[in-house]
């Protein structure tokens, strides 16, 4: 495991809900486990379909969290 010493975060993402991002990743991990189970039971097509669907869903959900953080940043910037 690599240790991160510093990370530069754009000001637009300072209000990003990191717990929601981690929660979405946790949901994705559960789906990966389900896909592995499907594959081990011989249903490779269903496993691949589940992964493709969840990857696009994860991307959309994370994108929405980033968008909301950007909107909040715009609102606070306008208040200044």
Image: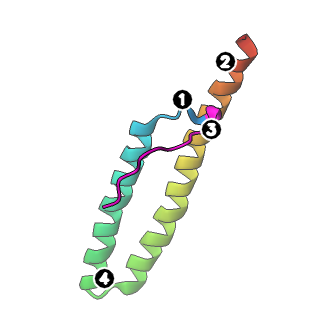
Q: Is residue 58 above or below residue 21?
A: below
Start-end of magenta stretch? 1-12
Q: Are marks 2 and 1 in contact (CB under 8 Å)?
A: yes
Residue 5 image position (x, y, % from top left): 41, 46
Give the residue at mark 4.
39
Q: In front: 45, or 12? A: 12
Q: Which residue is mark 3?
A: 10
Q: Residue at x 53, y 48 (%)?
A: 62
Element at label 4: helix
Query: How many residues crowd mark 3 within 10 Å: few (<14), some (14–19), many (20+)?
Result: few
The answer to which image quadrant residue 68 occupies is top right
* Vertical order, 39 against 25 (above or below): below
Residue 2 inside the magenta-drawn segment: yes
Gap in angstroms between the C-alphas marked 4 and 2: 48 Å
Figure quadrant of residue 13:
top right
- On the rendered structure, is 3 left or right of 41? right
Expressed as whole percent of the image width and height from the top left, the position of residue 75 reads 69, 20
The tag on residue 15 is: 1
Q: In the image, what residue occupies the spot 24% across and 84% down?
A: 41
Whole-angstrom CA distance, mark 1 to mark 3, is 10 Å
- N-terminal of the two: label 4 or label 2? 4
Find the distance from the CA under tag 2 to the CA under tag 3. Answer: 15 Å
Q: Residue furthest bottom?
A: 42
Q: Which one is earlier in the sequence, the residue at label 2 or at label 3?
A: 3
Q: Sequence-wise, which precedes: disc 2 or disc 1?
A: 1
- Label annotation for residue 76: 2
Which dot, 3 or 4, sits closer to the camera? 3
Q: Secondary structure at mark 2?
A: helix
């Amino acid at each position: 495991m690599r240790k991160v010493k510093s990370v530069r975060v754009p000001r637009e993402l300072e209000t990003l809900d990191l717990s929601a991002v981690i929660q979405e990743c946790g949901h994705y991990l559960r789906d990966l486990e389900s896909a592995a189970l499907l594959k081990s039971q011989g249903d490779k097509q269903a496993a691949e379909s589940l992964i493709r669907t969840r990857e696009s869903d994860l991307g959309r959900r994370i994108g929405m969290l980033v968008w909301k953080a950007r909107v909040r940043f715009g609102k606070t910037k306008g208040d200044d």
